[in-house]
Image (tube, rainbow, N blue to C red):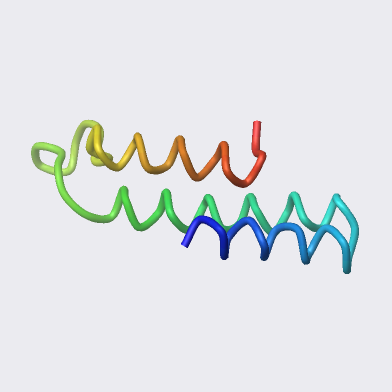
Amino acid sequence: MAKLLLAARQLVDEAAGRGEGHRFASALYALGESVASASGGGFFGLGNKISADERVILDGLKKLLRLP
């Protein structure tokens, strides 16, 4: 999966430019963050809904997609 995401980012960078590639990567990351925050935790909907394991995955995704 990581290779596929990296290839998609590179393809968008090459076809549409780095700015568009950054927007694409940011949208992918935002989607992942939305999914992670929609599931699980939080007491009565309060607090952090993203688990520690999900945070590790999101941090790895951010690094893979070369996001700040």
Horizontally, residue 50 falls left or right of residue 68, namely left
Residue farthest to the front, as pictured? 3
Q: Residue at x 63, y 56 (%)?
A: 6
Where residue 16 appears, x then y in whole percent?
A: 88, 65
User: In screen coordinates, is 35 left or right of 30?
Assistant: left
Residue at left offset 42%, top offset 42%: 58
Vertical order, 5 against 67 (above or below): below
**Pick the front one: 15 or 27:** 15
Q: In terms of image quadrants, where is residue 9?
A: bottom right
Q: Is residue 10 above or below residue 40?
A: below
Q: Is residue 29 left or right of residue 34?
A: right
Residue at 30% across, 42% down = 54
Quadrant in the rendering for residue 51: top left
Q: Residue at x 78, y 64 (%)?
A: 12
Q: Quadrant of the C terminus?
A: top right
Count how many numbered circles sit on residues in the image: 0
* Residue 55 x/y as whole percent: 34, 36
Residue 33 locus on image (x, y percent): 42, 49
* Left or right: residue 56 compared with residue 67: left
Provide residue 44's location: percent of width, then percent of height: 10, 42
Nearer to the camera, 21 or 47: 21
The residue lying toward the viewer, choosing from 39 and 9, is 9
